[in-house]
Image (tube, rainbow, N blue to C red):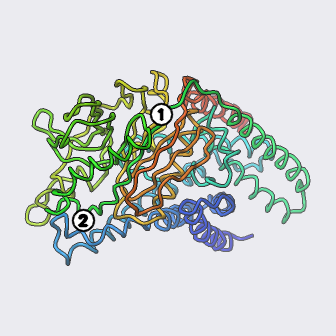
Amino acid sequence: MNISRKKYWAFFFGTSGGLLAGVGLSQGGFLFTLLALAFLWASKGFPTAGCLWGGGATLFSHRWLLALHPLTWLGIPEWLSLPIAVFIWLSCGMFGALLVGCWCFLGNTSFFNKTVQPSIQQQFLVAFALALIWALLEVCLTKSPMFWVGLSVSFLPQDRWLVGLARWIGAGGVVTVQLLMGWWLWQLGVAKVRGDLFLRLLAWGSFAVLLIHFLGWQLISNDQFSSTKRIALWQTNIPTREKFTTLQLKRLPESIQEALEQAEKLNSDFLVAPEGTMQTGQTLASPSPIPFLTGGFRWIDSKQRSALLVFREGETKFKEVIDKYRLVPLGEWLPSLPGITPKGLSFVGGLEPGEASRLLRWNGPPVGVAICYELSDGNALAKATMRGAEWILSIANLDPYPLSLQKQFIALAQLRSIELARDVITVANTGPTSLVLSSGEVISLIPPFKNDVASIDVHLSNKISGYARWKELPLITSLIITLFAISRLKKTIDN
């Protein structure tokens, strides 16, 4: 096949693969993602085609960013609102395109791309190294403000057995397996066209796929728990654009007391409310009948922070607190723009991050806390479980975004539950408000966009998963060994 025709097909695979990946990332369609990854490998030879794949996947899966419009409630003029929302969305798409393009470029360097026709074993070695690099980069992005949703959640909720491997190798390990499965499908297509190795590849690949599903199923089956707690969850359903109106501020203290009384009637041990429920300096109207964990704001050293506040039974002021450490880009930490955004792109006037530790010790069971998209950082929550967290609590405010974002958020919760062998509670303003069992099974408690209080038994555990113990060390070690093997192989070929 000549170069121009190869380029044509690479661009076709890059464009269509990106759209398929976007569907998989936004809807949890693992078959779409698997086919998209095969198309990614087919387009890898041309970095520009890789850019099309990354850009298409990001733009389609993150189209919920357009729901930011209108931004008038942030003090932004109406004429500027839609251009800003579109700019944010396109910027994320360009970032995704750049990352995938750079990965393709790396795969085409002389170190990975040899001129001599390599054997299928040698090709697998290179594919394994490139998959590990992608996986570790995705893990690194969870520590940055640019990360949103990666490949690791794209097989959820349908394929929990494969994602069960995360119990030992984490999200990065799942990404590595996903990419290798895509590579296998691509190689099957190549072998079918060439007329060689097809049956051999089909047999070995099918065996590997069945084996990893069996292992994943074994890892998430029959978890043991030390005890349970009855926890009430309050989905407030207060639109963010109306949150600071006089009517809502006046109604809030009464709503909190009603939720606490309802939780007490449900025989709950404590009540949890979403991110940002309480205002800075706000106290309860009367002593809390049960412990109350709620998102709110506080001042420390003349700086405002978003936090999880703990009100003890019989108290009106919070006693324990854990601050949000990962602020939402453009929503909580963008500086003010004179004459355009006097408060920055945050209604509360800009926030400061807290400490990175996600472990909260209080007079209840120790908990690993994720506020909003801190849920994407499995490494930080793994450290919390190693230090004693017996369950995971995720509070968020996903308004004004649509249901597609809620699906991605609950998929992140599933991944964390499997990874850490912990039940995960999600409590969000408009949803999702759910219990995710340590096996990744989701129990939805309150329908989206509804104000209600629900109660559920949460399992507590002291089990330490393989991922919590080793984190990314197995992936890093595997990459070093693989790169060394490729280097030795390259020297052999060169000689």
What is the x, y in percent for residue 370?
Answer: 40, 40
Q: In which quarter of the image is the C terminus?
A: top right
Say whether residue 130 is visible: no
Q: Which of 199 and 32 is in front in this view?
A: 32
- In the image, taking residue 50 as reference, residue 183 lies left or right, namely right
Query: Which residue carries the number 2 mark?
Result: 241
**Which of the 4 image quarters holds residue 472?**
top right
What is the x, y in percent for residue 10?
Answer: 63, 68
Q: Relative to residue 131, is residue 391 depicted above or below?
A: above
Label disc, if present, on residue 379 of the rendered structure: 1
Other-residue count near label 2 (Cα within 10 Å), few / some / many at <14 / 14–19 / ≥20: some
Residue at image coords 42%, 43%: 232
Q: Which of 245 and 465 is in front in this view?
A: 245
Q: What residue type is labelled 1?
A: Asn
Say whether residue 27 is visible: yes
Residue at image coords 52%, 56%: 100
